[in-house]
Image (tube, helix red, strand yellow):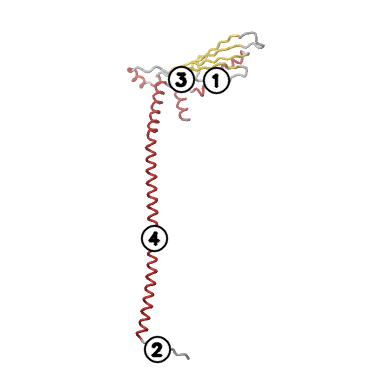
Amino acid sequence: MNISINLLPGEILARREQEQKRRLLLAAGGIILALFLIINGTLLASAMLARSQLNDTKEQRLALEQQAQSLKPFEELKARVAEVEALLQKVQGRAPDYNLLMSDIGLHIPATVRLTALTATFKPPAAPKPDAKADAKAAPESAPVGSGEVIIRGETFDHNSVAGWLEELRGVPALSDIRCQFSASDGAQTVQLVRFEIKATLNAAPKAAAAGSKAGD
């Protein structure tokens, strides 16, 4: 049987217990201090990161504002161009759709026909008189729209193909009053060609067609 006998005085035992308690308190304080430093450091790093991001956002905002200021003259120029285009459209009236006109003319050209010239002229309507502005507002359908002329010249050795083409041209909405003249060429060639000239009145684009083309754009 082992018997443990403590021969140390009571004061020494009490001092050792106090020393152990002090060490425990120091260890606990060190742990708490370390946790505090870690948490504080994390918060400080987050604050610095947020401040850096805020500064970047401010710089980007300033850059965008400067870019917007630099683009402002172009916006004003674009608005002026739109105003000028609207004014030209108002002065010139409803101009023909030349792309559609060329497509309609060339859609049914016979193989035996060779074009040598094609011209299209359009004269805008005269500006309305000051005393006629009220009448133009009251009856916009009767406002002048302008007109022009299309001249087609070419050569062929087959009158019938040109006659059939004329019938197709009479179905083109932009053309009216279509007339054709023939003249024989020199007989020195192997195949005698016949020159022809087609004249037609070029009409302004109707409002429905103009609205449709704008909607399509």
Q: Quadrant of residue 132?
A: top left
Question: Do callouts 2 and 1 mark residues in contact (Cβ within 8 Å)?
Answer: no
Secondary structure under tag 3 reads loop
**Marks 4 and 1, how far apart in space?**
81 Å
Sequence-earlier tag: 3 or 1 = 1
Sequence-earlier tag: 2 or 1 = 2
- The amino acid type, in three-letter code, at marker 3 is Ala
Sequence-earlier tag: 4 or 1 = 4
Q: Quadrant of residue 180?
A: top right
**Marks 4 and 3, how far apart in space?**
78 Å
Secondary structure under tag 2 reads loop
Tell me if 82 is positioned left or right of 106 in this view: left
Q: Quadrant of residue 131?
A: top left
Where in the figure is residue 111, as x and y percent of width and height? 62, 19
Q: Residue reaching furthest right? A: 190
- The amino acid type, in three-letter code, at marker 1 is Ile
- The amino acid type, in three-letter code, at marker 4 is Gly
The residue labelled by disc 3 is: 204
Question: Do callouts 4 and 1 mark residues in contact (Cβ within 8 Å)?
Answer: no
Where in the figure is residue 67, as x and y percent of width and height? 39, 39
Sequence-earlier tag: 3 or 2 = 2
Question: Do callouts 3 and 1 mark residues in contact (Cβ within 8 Å)?
Answer: no
Secondary structure under tag 1 reads helix
**Residue nearest the viewer, comparing 159 with 102:** 102
Where in the figure is residue 208, as x and y percent of width and height? 45, 25
Sequence-earlier tag: 4 or 3 = 4
Query: Image point 38% across, 27% down: which residue?
Result: 83
The residue labelled by disc 4 is: 41
Query: Image point 37% across, 58% down: which residue?
Result: 44
The residue labelled by disc 2 is: 7
Where in the figure is residue 217, as x and y percent of width and height? 47, 30
**Marks 2 and 1, how far apart in space?**
129 Å
